[in-house]
Amino acid sequence: MELILKEDVQNLGFKDDLVTVKNGYGRNFLIPQGLATMATPSAKKVLAEDLKQRAHKEKKVIDAANKVADALRKLELKIPAKTGAGDKLFGSVTATDLASAIEKDGHAIDKKFIAIPGGSVKRTGSYSAQIRLHREVIIDFPFEVVAEQKK
């Protein structure tokens, strides 16, 4: 079944992508949730015209995402966390914690665009996360989890 995505769908595609999925997934999930529409010949023509018009606007968005990416690459982030014996954390550091730490430095990034391998960090040390600023701008963001200083 060919569908045109109305929104970004994790592990499937981005908005306005033409994707092929199994009939049940499209009919029972994507279309009722409003995430996709059927890819009829007329819908494909409308999509092609929209993409032509949007190409010029897209360049400005990509340039802005690249500026944010350059600023993030210069950022050295240390996230303090409570630790137990050794280097184990009480709890974990997740994409939400990373997003709020980046926001404190002046860059608002939604947590759903941050991917930490394994989902969360449970020990102190240096790690890397992928941040998707745009469908074409994805950066590896290094950060460090350090033990919180006891008062």
Image (cartoon, helix red, strand yellow):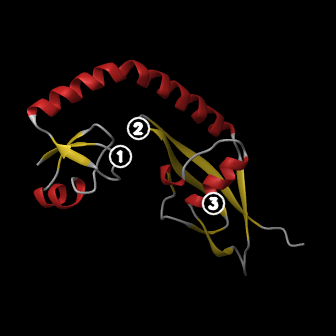
Marks 1 and 2 in Cβ contact (< 8 Å):
yes
- Of callouts 1 and 2, the N-terminal one: 1
Name which residue lies at 42% across and 25% down: 58
Q: CA distance from mark 1 to mark 2?
A: 10 Å
- Sequence-wise, the earlier of marks 3 and 1 is 1
Amino acid on which the number 3 mark rests in the picture: Asp
Q: Which mark is residue 110?
A: none
Above or below, 20 relative to 16: below
Q: Secondary structure at mark 3?
A: helix
Helix, strand or loop status at disc 1:
loop
Q: Which residue is mark 1?
A: 8
In which quadrant of the rendered image does the C terminus lie?
A: bottom right
Q: Name which residue type carries label 1.
A: Asp
Residue 104, placed above or below residue 55: below
Determine the CA span between mark 3 and mark 2. 23 Å
- Kindly report which numbered mark, 3 or 1, lies closer to the viewer in this rendering: 1
Task: Identify which residue, 95 or 129, lies in the foreground.
Answer: 95
Q: Position of residue 111 (x, y in %)?
A: 54, 54
- For disc 3, the marked residue is 97
